[in-house]
Image: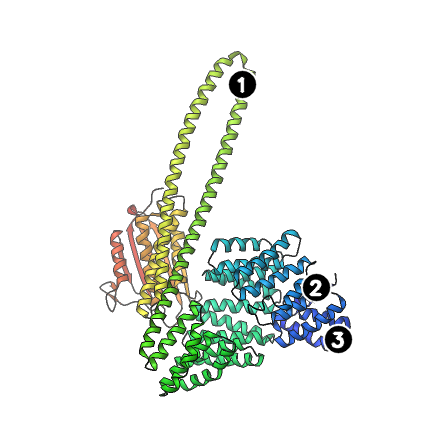
């Protein structure tokens, strides 16, 4: 009971104050307390949601005192909490995992299932952090077994299931990940449970490449954390969401989230998180080419991390700053930062940082006319590079190795590293491509399974209805025989004949329904496969765009990707609708236009989309050209109508009038000069040629105008467009 009273006190305090403010008030209270009051405050300082805000020295001091007092009081829960707190600040290696403190906590928890389940969670965290996934899963299984045998509060069950899902997501086992996440969510009871569960969902989606889902989950977890005043997790979730946006090159929105996270951290004096946010902002500016800002934020992060004495975090920031110095060709500063931090990276075995700094220092010396000094940096860099095993980390290391050896005139070694770099880069690309294909196949199989279940439910309902009807007929026959005994023989013969005819008719109807269902299923399967193949083509175009630096090629690939997506949406509509030969244009055009706005990452506060779409169904031969023409016109408006962050409106109108179909796409942008009634272009325009060719296929007329923006009107005969009902 004492443990729950302490926890209630903590939750009431947390409801009225942010996590860092609570830690400050607890510190201040502790300095004036003795006896039981001091003991209770120590327990709150070592709580799971407060201890991450403490420095290593503070937490170790509080934990040792709590262990001594809990031992005297024989308070097992507090005793275990003290040992767990000691474990979290201890350096993890394969030799000391599980740590001596965690083993002591496990011994104390043997007769306390809830405490023991928590210990298994922390044991799993230690193993997973070292890449020992088999051992981590064993610890998770032991913890979950305790929940199966005892009725325990759900928090650590959620964390154990989430940890298992995270391991499977790292292995790209999507079905196992989804199953565990669904099981985890089923145990959510409180806002704190939801916050934890959403963080695991986000982490798993991020691991399997579902970045939009990960972003949504992080933001939901952030909002819950903010609402329950857990600002430690609120800042962490917001920073993770910003990092996803940064990796998607949506720099403006990412910077907005980083700044909001920094504001929260400052307001609550959370210096540790503020240092991480400054580092992330530096990385954003480094990737976007604003290296001056990258170095400025890197120095802010470095100052905080040096005060806290966290060598690995210090080295991560120093390496980012070194890469920015190299990008700006400020070789003296590059040499200085490498000389300062390379010994530290060697002492903590951060091989990636050691190799990068060694190679960058060699490049800087070569560029400043000191090749002999530069060669001295190659040996530690080459040795460290041999220890880098992660493929994503190895690719940039090998490129720097190639650049360093080439800069120093060691061309044979440079060529060898260049070959290794290209091979590693290709392997990384193949891994990404295979991951995308596996993800799409898994999604396709899930959809097929859902369709099969739906069909079985429908067949079951039909069988029940047929059984009810048969029973009704049987009772009617019995009653008729009993009440009309005089004409029993005549009614009997009539009933037999009617039953025989009904059976034959029923069998014929069943066979027709079965064949019709098979045809529809086959058509849906065809459209589904076409849609999936088009999605794979779209994904491959996106991957190809990542591998090229030419702006024109990137734009051409993005435009091609949009055209492929437009056709994929058509086939998706076909297999989702009951009418397999017609496309409902209202929903299709809205989804197509929204997809283009997402593709070009349009700020909808700057450019608005207005639609006036009649709910008309077109056959595939008409819907494909209409969709591609709309795709080209909207794309052209997004690219050219609103330069220099100008705002405006794009409007799409689709109407039927008498025997005509009218499509109109307008914008109130800068307009396009016309020549002979057509948009004037500086050279051949494939997009314009495509629009004209598709219009000819529809036997349609095109009209372009340039008044208060651009307008394109297409009028086609309705007789060639309407799908059969």
Question: Which residue is the site of mark 2?
Answer: 77
State the separation of the CA atoms marked 3 and 1: 93 Å
Q: Going by the image, does 428 lie left or right of 313?
A: left
Color theme of the render: rainbow
Question: Which residue is the site of mark 1?
Answer: 480
Q: Nearer the viewer, mark 3 or mark 2?
A: 2
Q: Which residue is found at the position 46% from the left and 58% from the top?
A: 172
Q: Is the residue 330 above or below the residue 602 in the image?
A: below
Q: Going by the image, does 493 lie left or right of 369?
A: right
Please provide percent x and percent y for residue 323. 42, 78
Question: Which residue is the site of mark 3?
Answer: 33
Q: Earlier in the sequence, mark 1 or mark 2?
A: 2
Q: Going by the image, does 86 lie left or right of 533?
A: right
Choose between 378 and 36: the one closer to the eye. 378
Whether label 3 touches label 1, CB < 8 Å:
no
Residue 192 visible, this angle:
yes
Would you call the spot at circle 2 few (<14 residues within 10 Å), some (14-19), or many (20 or more)?
A: some
Q: Is the residue 581 above or below the residue 167 in the image?
A: above
Please provide percent x and percent y for residue 268. 61, 74
The N terminus, quarter of image: bottom right
Choose between 274 and 127: the one closer to the eye. 127
């Amino acid at each position: 009971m004492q443990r729950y009273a302490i926890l209630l006190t903590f939750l009431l305090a947390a409801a009225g104050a942010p996590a860092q403010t609570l830690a400050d008030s607890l510190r201040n209270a502790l300095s004036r307390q003795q006896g039981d009051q001091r003991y209770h405050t120590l327990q709150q300082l070592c709580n799971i949601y407060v201890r991450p805000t403490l420095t290593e020295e503070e937490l170790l001091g509080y934990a040792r005192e709590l262990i001594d007092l809990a031992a005297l009081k024989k308070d097992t829960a507090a005793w275990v909490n003290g040992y767990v707190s000691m474990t979290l600040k201890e350096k993890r290696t394969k030799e000391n995992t599980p740590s001596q403190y965690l083993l002591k906590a496990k011994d104390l928890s043997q007769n306390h299932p809830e405490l023991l389940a928590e210990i298994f969670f922390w044991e799993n965290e230690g193993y997973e952090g070292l890449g020992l996934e088999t051992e981590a899963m064993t610890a998770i299984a032991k913890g979950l077994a305790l929940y199966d045998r005892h009725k325990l509060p759900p928090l650590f069950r959620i964390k154990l299931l989430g940890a298992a899902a995270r391991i499977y997501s790292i292995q790209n086992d999507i079905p196992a990940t989804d199953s565990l996440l669904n099981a985890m969510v089923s145990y959510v009871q409180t806002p704190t449970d939801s916050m934890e569960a959403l963080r695991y969902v986000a982490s798993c989606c991020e691991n399997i490449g579902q970045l939009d889902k990960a972003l949504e989950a992080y933001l939901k977890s952030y909002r819950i954390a903010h609402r329950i005043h857990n600002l430690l997790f609120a800042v962490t979730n917001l920073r993770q969401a910003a990092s996803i946006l940064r990796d998607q090159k949506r720099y403006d929105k990412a910077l907005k989230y980083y700044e909001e996270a920094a504001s929260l951290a400052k307001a609550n004096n959370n210096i540790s998180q503020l240092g991480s946010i400054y580092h992330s902002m530096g990385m954003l500016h480094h990737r976007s080419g604003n290296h001056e800002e990258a170095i400025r934020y890197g120095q802010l992060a470095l100052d905080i991390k040096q005060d806290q004495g966290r060598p690995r975090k210090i080295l991560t920031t120093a390496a980012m700053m070194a890469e920015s110095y190299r990008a700006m060709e400020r070789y003296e500063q590059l040499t200085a930062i490498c000389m300062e931090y390379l010994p530290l990276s060697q002492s903590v075995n951060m091989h990636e940082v050691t190799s990068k700094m060694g190679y960058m220092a060699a490049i800087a010396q070569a560029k400043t006319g000191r090749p002999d000094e530069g060669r001295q940096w190659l040996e530690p860099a080459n040795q460290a590079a041999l220890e880098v095993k992660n493929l994503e980390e190895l690719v940039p290391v090998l490129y720097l190795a190639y650049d360093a050896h080439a800069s120093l005139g060691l061309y044979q070694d440079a060529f060898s590293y260049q070959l290794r770099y290209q091979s590693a880069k290709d392997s990384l690309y193949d891994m990404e491509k295979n991951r995308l294909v596996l993800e799409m196949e898994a999604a396709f199989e899930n959809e097929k399974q859902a369709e099969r279940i739906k069909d079985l439910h429908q067949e079951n309902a039909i069988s029940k209805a047929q059984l009810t009807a048969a029973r009704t007929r049987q009772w009617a026959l019995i009653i008729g025989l009993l009440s009309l005994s005089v004409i029993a023989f005549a009614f009997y013969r009539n009933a037999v004949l009617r039953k025989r005819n009904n059976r034959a008719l029923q069998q014929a109807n069943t066979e027709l329904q079965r064949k019709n269902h098979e045809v529809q299923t086959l058509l849906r399967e065809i459209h589904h496969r076409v849609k999936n193949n088009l999605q794979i083509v779209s994904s491959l175009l996106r991957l190809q765009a990542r591998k090229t630096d030419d702006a024109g090629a990137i734009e051409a690939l993005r435009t091609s990707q949009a055209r492929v997506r437009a056709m994929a949406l058509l086939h998706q509509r076909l297999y989702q609708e009951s009418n397999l030969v017609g496309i409902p244009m209202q929903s299709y055009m809205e989804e197509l236009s929204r997809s283009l706005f997402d593709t070009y990452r349009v700020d909808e506060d700057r450019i608005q989309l207005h639609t006036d779409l009649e709910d008309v169904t077109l056959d595939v031969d008409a819907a494909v050209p209409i969709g591609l023409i709309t795709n080209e016109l909207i794309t052209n408006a997004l690219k050219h109508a609103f330069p220099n962050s100008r705002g405006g409106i794009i409007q799409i109108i689709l109407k039927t009038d008498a025997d005509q179909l009218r499509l109109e796409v307008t914008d109130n942008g800068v307009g396009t000069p016309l020549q002979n009634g057509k948009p004037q272009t500086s050279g051949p325009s494939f997009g314009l040629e495509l629009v004209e060719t598709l219009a000819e296929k529809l036997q349609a007329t095109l009209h372009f105008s340039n008044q208060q923006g651009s307008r394109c009107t297409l009028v086609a005969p309705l007789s060639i467009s309407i799908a059969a009902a």
